[in-house]
Amino acid sequence: MVLFGFLDGHLLACTGGGPDGPAPVPEFDSDTHPGMAALAPRWADFGSVAEFDRMLDIVLDGIRGQAARSS
């Protein structure tokens, strides 16, 4: 279930911006939204192949860890 949710979310992120892919990361006013302004640079790679691979590794590591604890 987690894996399918991850894949669905990634596909939505990649296609949600229209035919050209994801929408650009908005700029946030650091005085009004300091948390969002601090996080925005981390979103620059969101939806990329590298980000997908990194997040998929995290999901699969979690599944492997759960399977090892269950056996």
Image: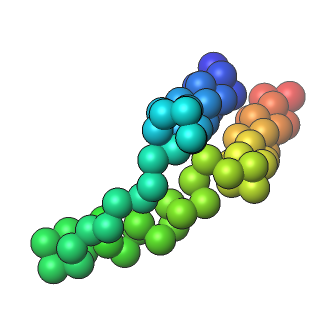
Q: Indicate the colouring scheme.
A: rainbow
Residue 46 horizontal/vertical position (percent) = 57, 53
Q: Quadrant of the N terminus?
A: top right
In this figure, what is the number of numbered marks? 0
Of residues 58 and 37, the one drawn nearer to the viewer in this rendering: 37
Residue farthest to the left, as pictured: 32
Q: Is residue 33 visible?
A: yes
Is residue 19 positioned above or below 61 on the image? Answer: above
Q: Is residue 2 visible?
A: no
Taking the spot 47% from the left edge, 71% from the top edge, the residue there is 41
Left/right of residue 33 with respect to residue 6 in the rendered view: left
Residue farthest to the bottom, as pictured: 31
Is residue 70 positioned above or below 17 on the image? Answer: above
Residue 42 horizontal/vertical position (percent) = 51, 67
Is residue 8 positioned above or below 62 on the image? Answer: above
Of residues 25 and 19, the one drawn nearer to the viewer in this rendering: 19
Residue 49 horizontal/vertical position (percent) = 75, 49
Taking the spot 37% from the left edge, 75% from the top edge, the residue there is 38
Q: Quadrant of residue 2?
A: top right
Q: Quadrant of residue 19?
A: top right
Taking the spot 71% from the left edge, 46% from the top edge, the residue there is 52
Q: Quadrant of residue 30?
A: bottom left
Taking the spot 53% from the left edge, 38% from the top edge, the residue there is 13
Q: Quadrant of the C terminus?
A: top right
Left/right of residue 67 with respect to residue 15 in the rendered view: right
Residue 31 horizontal/vertical position (percent) = 15, 79
